Image (cartoon, coloured by chain):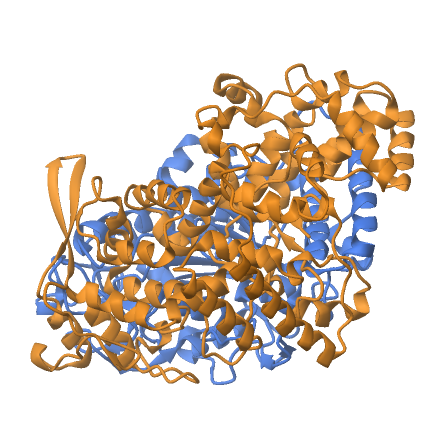
Amino acid sequence: MAATLAMTTALLGACTLATRGATVDAPPAVSVTAGPAAQALRDADREVVEKLDGLIRRRWDEGGIVVAPSVDDYGFLRRVQLDLVGRVPSPEEIERFFALPRDSRRERWVALLLNDREHADYWAWRLYDLLFDVRVQEAPRMTSPARMWLREQVDGNRPWDEIVRSLLTATGELEYVPATSFTIAHLQISGLEGLTTTISDRLLGVQLACAQCHDHPYASWTRQDFWSVAAGLAGARVRAEPVDPKFTRLHLEETLGGQGRIAAEFGVDAKQAPAPALMGLPVTAHKGESRRDALVRTMLDTDLVAKAMVARTWTDLFGRGLHEPWNDLGGPNETHSAELEHLAAAFRESSYDVRRLLQVLTATQAYSRSSEGVPETRDAAVQSFARAAVRPLNSHQVYRSLVRVTGLDQVPPSVFLFVAHAPEDSLRQRYERVFDDGCTRSVEQTRVELAQSLAVLNDGITHLGSQARHGLALAQLLEGRSGVEHRIHAVYLRVLSRPPRPEEVERAKRLVHEAGEPDAYEDLVYALLNSAEFLTNH
Amino acid sequence: MLLTRRRLLELGVAAIAAGSSGRVRAAGSRSATAMVLLFMRGGMSQIDTFDPKPGRATGGEFASIETKVSGLLFAEHLPLLAARARKLTVLRSLVGTESDHIRAEHLVHTGYVPQTGIGFPAFGSYVEKFSDASELPGYVILGPGERYGPEVLGPAYAPFSIAEPSHATQTLGSPAGVLASRRQRRHRLMNSLDASFATRNASPAVDQIREMRNRAVILSESSRTEAFDIYRETLATRQRYGEHQFGRACLLARRLVDAEVPFVEVVLNGWDTHADNFRRVADLSARLDTGLSALLDDLDASGRLATTIVLCIGEFGRTPRINDRAGRDHYALCSSAVLAGGGIASGRVVGATDPDGVEVVARPVSVADLFASLAHALGVPADREIVTSGGRPITVVDAEGEVVPELFGR
C-alpha cells in the first residue's frame, strides 16, 4: 500500500486541473483547505460514539456476527464524500486527504466537509427530499423557495428544532417568507390531510397516515389521533391574491377557524370536533401562541422529532435503518431501540446540532466497516451494521459524481450546453426524474430501474464525458502523464477514487494493446462510469 | 452479442430471485393478452366525470350529457367518450378502504393495502411474468409518480418508466459515432469489471445494476425500439390523441400494445382537487376525453381492443360534499372506474350510488374483486402462492377478491 500511495502522490503532483469553478464565489474561509473553521469531534461527542460502539458491538458478540474489517482510507473517503457532499472525491481531494495525519485524517476530513458550502447544497437537497415528496415537488413554484431557504439554514448549521418550528409556524407571503413554503405547498397540493401525513411521516417518524380513515392495525394510533394533529394545523389558511392573469400571490395566514373541517370528518358539529392533541398529549395554546405554535412546542417536548431525524440520517448514511422503515417508530421492526434512544438523547443534548450528529455517525465503528465479505455471512452482518451495505447512488450523487468525474462541472455554461446537448439544469432534472429517491429507502428495498441504466449507458454525459477531447477532463489527464501504467492509474483514481489493483492494471494494459490509445482509455472511462462499483456507495 | 431476454434469463444472472425463472405463459383460457392502465393520479372526482348527480346539491357545477347508451349519463366535459359509451363498461360501485394517497395508490397497483415488512409485487409485474417473453420491456409506465415494482419476482419484471413520452427514445439508442464493435468491447469490459466487483461486494444493489444494465444493452441494440417513437405517427394522429403529455402517452401506449408489450400504465396527474375542483376537472376531463377516445378508436380499428383491457381508475374517489375552496376531498367510500376491451362487457353500467353519490347502493365491488376479474381475463393465476421478501406467503390476488361476472359477457 505504501508504494501505491507514493505513486498516487507523484501522479497527483503532475495534475494540472483547475480547481472547481463552483467555489469561486465562496469566501476562502469555507473552502476545504481552510482548517481552523472546522471543529473536530468534541469530547462529549466522543463519549456518545464510544457508548454507541459498545451497544452495537454487544449485538455483534451476542449474535456471533462475522464483523467486516475496517474500510481502507480510499474507501472511507469516497463513502463520506458521497454521504456528506453528494459526490465522489476528485484526485486533488484525495491528495489533500492523504496529506493529513493518518490517525486523525478521517475525523478532520469530515469536519472540513461539513463546513463546505457543497455540503450545505447537498444536504439541503436531502432535506428537501424529506420534506416534499415527489407529488408535492411537482409544484416547484411553491416548493423551490424552501430549497433556497434550507440551503441557508444548513450553511448556518441552524438547529433542527428551529428549522422545524419555522417550517410549521411561519406566516406571510411565500416569496418573502420562504419558510411558509412547506405549509403552503402541502395545503395547496394535498390538503390538510397531506400536511398532517407529511408531518407525522417525515418529521415525527410515525405512520399516522393509515389512522386517517381507520384505527392503526398494530400501533395504538386511532382516527382521533390523526385528526387531533390535523386540528392543531387547521387554523392555517392559504389566501390567494391574484396579481395578474399569470401570477397569484400566496399568503399563509393563521386563523381561528378550521374546526368545521375536522368536525365534518366525524359527522359532528364544530363544537364537538376533536381538540388539538399529539398522540394523547393535549395541545393547548398559551397566551400569544397560535394553535400551530402550541403543536410544535408539544412535538418538541417529546423526543419524536429528534428520533425521526436521527433515524432518517442514520438510514441515509448506512443504507439501512435502526428500525425498518425508519419512519415507523412503534412499528413491528424495532431492532436497535437502545442505539436510537441513545443517539436521540445526545442529539437533543446538543440542541439538535445536525453537524455534530453527522460527526458522531461517521466516527462510529459501524460506519467504518468494509462492504466486502463472503456472501454466506452477508445478510446478518449488513443487518447488524457489521458490514457496510452496498447501495445505489441517489440522483444527486449520480449527477454530481458524473459531472465531476467527466470534468463537465468545470466547463463554462456555453461549453456545457454544447458538450452535453442540454443546459445543466435540464440535464440534472433528467437524472432526477429517472433516479426518483424522494424517500430514504433501506438496501432491502433497493430498486434499480431500467431507465436509470439506460440514462448512464446512452445519455450525453457518459459518452461525451469519456471522450479524450480537448478541454475535457480525460484529455487533460492523459496529456499530463506519460506511460500506460500511469495513465491507467490516473483513470482509476479519477473515476473509482482508488488506485487499480495489479490484475486491473494488467487487464487495462491488454485493452490498450487491443484498442490502442486513446480509444482504450475512453472505453475504460466509459465502462467504469457504467460499472456497479461507480454507481453504488459501498 | 445480441442476447435475447430469455437467453439472459437462462444464463442465470445472479440477480434473478428464486421463483422468477423466466416468463411463464398463462394457463387456461384468457380473453386478454395485454392491459393499459390509465391511472388518474390524485383521485378522480366520480361525480364530475362518470357518475354525475344532476340537480343535487352534491352535483356541482357541471351539466350532464347523454351518451350512446340509453339512460347512461356522463358529466359534460366527456363528449367524445359519451359518443363511444357502447365500447365501455362503467363501474360505479368501487368501494375502497384507504383515503391516504400513498396507501390507496399501493392498493390499486398491487391489489393489497400496504403492510410493513411485506413487499407486494405490482400487478404489472405479474402480467409481464405471465406473458410471452420479448426483448422489449413488458411493464412500462408513462408519466410521473410512484413506480410499483416486482419485489420478490425479481428485477426482470421491474417497470420501465418514461416521464415524458416525447423523450422516450432519447436514451434508447446508442449515440451515433460509436461503432458496434466498439460498443461490444465496452459491454464486455463492463461485465468483467462488475463480475470482479460482485465477488467481493455481493449484494442486491450490484445484482440489480448488472441485470438492468444487461437489459439496457439488449434494448439499446434492439431494432424494435421504434415502438417507443411517437414521431413515426402522422401529425394528424398525434393531434387526435391531444397535444399534451397524457395524449402523447396514450399514443405511445397504443404503439407499445401494437408491439405486444403486455402491460402499460399511463398516468394522468392532477386529480387531487382539494381546491378549484371544477376548473381543474374540466381541464383534466378534456385530456382524458381525447386521449382515451383516440386509444379506443385505434385499438378497435386494428382489432387489438378485443384482446386488450383498458382500465381507467384513480386511487380513490372524491367527496360528494364541496368544500369552502370549491374543492372536493379524498373519498374512499365510492368511486368510479371505466373498463373496455379484452373480453370486458361493453355498453354496460355495473353498480350504482345513491342520488347524492354518498354510498354504493348496488353491486359493491372491492379493489380485490376488480383485480380478481382482471387476473381472470388476463390469465394471471390469482390463487398462486408467492413467498414475499419478508417471508410471508401471499396469493397473487387477495383471496378476498371474487371475479365480478357482470363485467364480462354480452
**Residue in the image at 66% along x and 49% along y:** A536
Identify the image quadrant of the C terminus of chain B.
bottom left
Residue B297 appears at what percent x and percent y? 41, 49
Locate residue A57 relative to residue A308 in the image: left or right.
Answer: right
Residue A308 appears at what percent x and percent y? 43, 66
Residue B326 appears at what percent x and percent y? 13, 58
Q: Quadrant of residue B127?
A: bottom right
Q: Nearer the viewer, residue B282 or B115?
A: B115
Locate residue A128 relative to residue A433 in the image: left or right.
Answer: left
**Residue in the image at 69% along x and 31% along y:** A91
Which hue belongs to chain B?
A: blue
Q: Is residue B84 visible?
A: no
Q: Is residue B97 visible?
A: yes
Q: Quadrant of residue A510?
A: top right
Q: Nearer the viewer, residue B314 or A290?
A: A290
Which hue belongs to chain A?
A: orange
Q: Residue furthest front?
A: A43
Q: Nearer the viewer, residue B201 or A102?
A: A102
With respect to residue A75, does A244 lie above or below?
above
With respect to residue A425, does A240 lie above or below?
below
Q: Nearer the viewer, residue A107 or B402?
A: A107
**Residue in the image at 71% along x and 48% along y:** A103
Locate residue B69 relative to residue A437 in the image: left or right.
Answer: left
With respect to residue A278, does A288 lie above or below?
above
**Residue in the image at 13% along x and 47% along y:** A240
Identify the image quadrant of the N terminus of chain B.
top right
Q: Quadrant of residue A70?
A: bottom right
Residue A271 appears at what percent x and percent y? 7, 79
